[in-house]
Amino acid sequence: MDQKGKPDLAIEPLGANHDRAAFSCGIAPLDKYLQTQARQDVDKNLGAVFVLTPDGKTIAGFYSLSQYSVQSDTIPDEIARKLTRYPHIPTTLIGRLARSTNFHGQGLGEILLMDALKRCLTTSKLVASWAVIVDAKDAESVAFYKKYGFIEIPQVPNRLFLPMATVAKMFP
């Protein structure tokens, strides 16, 4: 426990010891992904899944990361003009990010997002990534990401990006 009586939380790669079946965030596709697909994605190297846990078993939240690319013509013109003329731009995708309903109101969404962004930044120094991409599930999720500076991609509903240069300024 920390000094305020809250459980200490750790973020670690998804493992066999984590209780995926008990996780519920209230959004069926996210619950189903963690419960039925996430381990397969990790095993097949299709995605990296990280869990937030108070005890090494309970999953308070999770996110997934993978390499991705976006078509350069979907990036707003004022930004795209400053980039190269490649048809696709390398990015990192936060494919899913969710926190358990059992941990609502504790700021875990921000903790998960900040950890994901730090990992994206670190990885971008080894494998090029111009931005972080998210596909928000709904308007509430869009608003959440916008609070952290994410910019909507107009051609793709609920898709947002955050340039890696902006992420770098968040973690000097």
Image (spheres, rainbow, N blue to C red):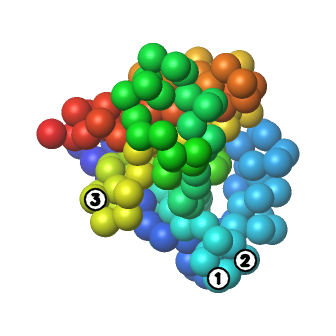
Left or right of residue 1: residue 34: right
Q: Mark 1 near mark 2, Cβ–Cβ under 8 Å?
A: yes
Quarter containing the C terminus: top left
Please tell me which residue lies in front, 97 or 146.
Answer: 146
How many residues crowd mark 3 within 10 Å: few (<14), some (14–19), many (20+)?
few
Please tell me which residue lies in front, 146 or 1.
Answer: 146
Per the model, the C-alpha gap separating discs 1 and 3 is 24 Å
> Residue 98, relative to residue 45: is it above or below?
above
Per the model, the C-alpha gap separating discs 3 and 2 is 27 Å
Q: Mark 3 near mark 2, Cβ–Cβ under 8 Å?
A: no
Q: Circle 3 sits on which residue? A: 125
Q: Secondary structure at mark 1?
A: helix
Question: In the image, what residue type sits under mark 2?
Answer: Gln
Q: Position of residue 102 (x, y in %)?
A: 63, 43
Q: Position of residue 21 (x, y in %)?
A: 76, 65
Of the two numbered discs 3 and 2 on the same chain, state the one appearing first in sequence.
Answer: 2
**Extreme residue in the front direction:** 85
Q: Residue at x 31, y 66 (%)?
A: 126
Q: Residue at x 32, y 51 (%)?
A: 121
Question: In the image, what residue type sits under mark 3?
Answer: Lys
Q: Residue at x 58, y 45 (%)?
A: 87
How many residues crowd mark 2 within 10 Å: few (<14), some (14–19), many (20+)?
few
> Residue 108, relative to residue 23: is it above or below?
above
Labels 1, 3: front one: 3
Question: In the image, what residue type sits under mark 1?
Answer: Asp
Labels 3, 2: front one: 3
Q: Position of residue 169 (x, y in %)?
A: 22, 33
Q: Circle 2 sits on which residue? A: 40
Of the two numbered discs 1 and 3 on the same chain, state the one appearing first in sequence.
Answer: 1
Q: Circle 1 sits on which residue? A: 43
Please tell me which residue lies in front, 166 or 99.
Answer: 166
